[in-house]
Image: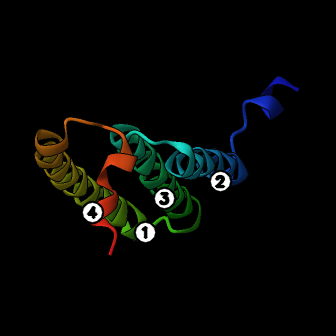
C-alpha cells in the first residue's frame, strides 16, 4: 500500500503541469498588475518544461531531446522575461503605474 502511494508516474507530472498551466492562464486573465502577469507567464513556461522532461524521461531513454528542449526553453524564457522587465521599466518611468489599464494606448 505504501509503495503504491509513493509510486509517481507520468500522469502525476501531467496533472502537476496542468495545474501550473491553469494557474498561470488564470493569473494572466485576471491580474491587472504587470509583474503578476509576468510571473504567471513563467508558471505557464514551467508547466511546458515539466511536460518536456516528463515525456522525455518516460518515453525516450537514449535521446535527450526533451531535456535539450527544456534547457533551450528556460534560456528563451529568461531572455523573454529580461526584455519584458526592461520594457516595463521604461513604461513605468513614463506612467508611474503598474496597473495594466494605464497602458491602453499600446493596443494595436
Looking at the image, is mark 2 or mark 1 earlier in the sequence?
2
Q: Give the label on residue 14, or none.
A: 2
Earlier sequence position, callout 2 versus callout 3: 2
Give the x, y percent position of residue 22. Answer: 62, 50
Q: Position of residue 25 (x, y in %)?
A: 56, 53
Residue 49 % position (x, y): 44, 55
- Residue matched to label 4: 72
User: How far apart are the alpha carbons under marks 4 and 3?
Assistant: 12 Å
**Real-space Cα separation, disc 2 to disc 1, in angstroms:** 22 Å
Identify the residue at image location x=29%, y=62%.
Answer: 105
Residue 17 lies, with reference to residue 63, above or below; the image says above
Q: Which residue is mark 3?
A: 48
Mark toward the start of the polypeptide (1 vs 3): 3
Residue 46 is situated, as x and y percent measured from the top left of the image, at: 44, 49
Left or right, 24 with respect to 45, comes to right
Residue at horizontal 37%, vertical 47%? 100
Given residues 55 and 19, the one toward you in this image is 19
Residue toward you, 19 or 60: 19
Amino acid at each position: 500500500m505504501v509503495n503504491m502511494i509513493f509510486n509517481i508516474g507520468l500522469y502525476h507530472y501531467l496533472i502537476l503541469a496542468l495545474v501550473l498551466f491553469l494557474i498561470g492562464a488564470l493569473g494572466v486573465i485576471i491580474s491587472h498588475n504587470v509583474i503578476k502577469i509576468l510571473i504567471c507567464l513563467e508558471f505557464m513556461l514551467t508547466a511546458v518544461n515539466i511536460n518536456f522532461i516528463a515525456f522525455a524521461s518516460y518515453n525516450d531513454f537514449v535521446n535527450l531531446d526533451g531535456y535539450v528542449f527544456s534547457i533551450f526553453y528556460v534560456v528563451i524564457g529568461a531572455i523573454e522575461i529580461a526584455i519584458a522587465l526592461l520594457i516595463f521599466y521604461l513604461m513605468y518611468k513614463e506612467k508611474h503605474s503598474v496597473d495594466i489599464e494605464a497602458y491602453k494606448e499600446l493596443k494595436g
